Image (cartoon, rainbow, N blue to C red):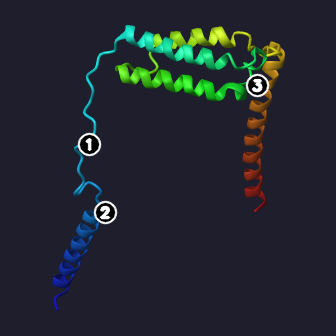
Amino acid sequence: MDTNLLTLFKLSLIFAVNMLMTRSLSDADGVDLSFTQQPRLLQCNQTVLLLEMERCGERFRSDMSHIHPDDRCNLTHFIREYHVFSSCTETNAERIGCFWPNPAVERFIISIHKHFFSNCSLEQVFIDPPDDTLTLLILVPVFLTLAMVVLVVWCSKRSDLLA
């Protein structure tokens, strides 16, 4: 048998097997894609959006009334209520046809945060270190890095001399 004919036969066999494998691995064959959503062309109605945000806020206020004011700075005490509030704002914004978050929703969420979490500042307020300390904390690692580079280069040159 001719070697060119044998090579041609092998290539056509590889091509046929590859085609069959890729066809069987394809998920799109025989799948009905008619259930996929068409893009919505809703315009964002800010008035309806704000009304829905108020509804979400009222439910959050009701849920937070069960949380003791001293526990409002500890997220573990109200994480479920906050998740419900966040999901409510997101779901309603998307249902109305608005992006989430958008400026109106952000303003509403900030007002909720100011109302419930304004006293949740840290007990210890961290301040920047003095400039001398900050300069020292920056320059020491820089000079150590440069010293290590010089040391590696110097050792590599010494090993050349010793060899």
Query: Local crowd at mark 3 within 10 Å, few (<14), some, or many (≥20)?
Result: few
Q: In this view, does 52 lie to the left or right of 119?
A: left
Secondary element under disc 3, as helix, strand or loop, is helix
The residue type indicated by label 2 comes to Leu
The residue type indicated by label 1 comes to Phe
Query: Local crowd at mark 1 within 10 Å, few (<14), some, or many (≥20)?
Result: few
- Residue 130 occupies quadrant: top right
Quarter of the image for the C terminus: give it.
Answer: bottom right
Q: Disc 2 vs disc 3: Cβ atoms closer than 8 Å? A: no
**Which is in the foreground here, disc 1 or disc 3?**
1
Quarter of the image for the N terminus: give it.
Answer: bottom left
**Which is in the foreground here, disc 2 or disc 1?**
1
The residue type indicated by label 3 comes to Ile
> Which residue bears the numbered disc 3?
138
Q: Is residue 71 left or right of residue 30?
A: right
38, above or below 2, in the image: above
**Residue sitting at x 74%, y 24%:** 74
- Which labelled disc corresponds to residue 4? none
Query: Local crowd at mark 2 within 10 Å, few (<14), some, or many (≥20)?
Result: few
Q: Earlier in the sequence, mark 2 or mark 3?
A: 2
> Which residue bears the numbered disc 2?
25
- Residue 42 occupies quadrant: top left
> Which residue bears the numbered disc 1?
35
Q: Nearer the viewer, residue 161 or 124?
A: 124
- In three-dimensional space, the C-alpha distance between marks 2 and 1, rounded to whole angstroms, equals 22 Å
Q: Earlier in the sequence, mark 2 or mark 1?
A: 2
Q: Which of marks 1 and 3 is nearer the N terminus?
A: 1
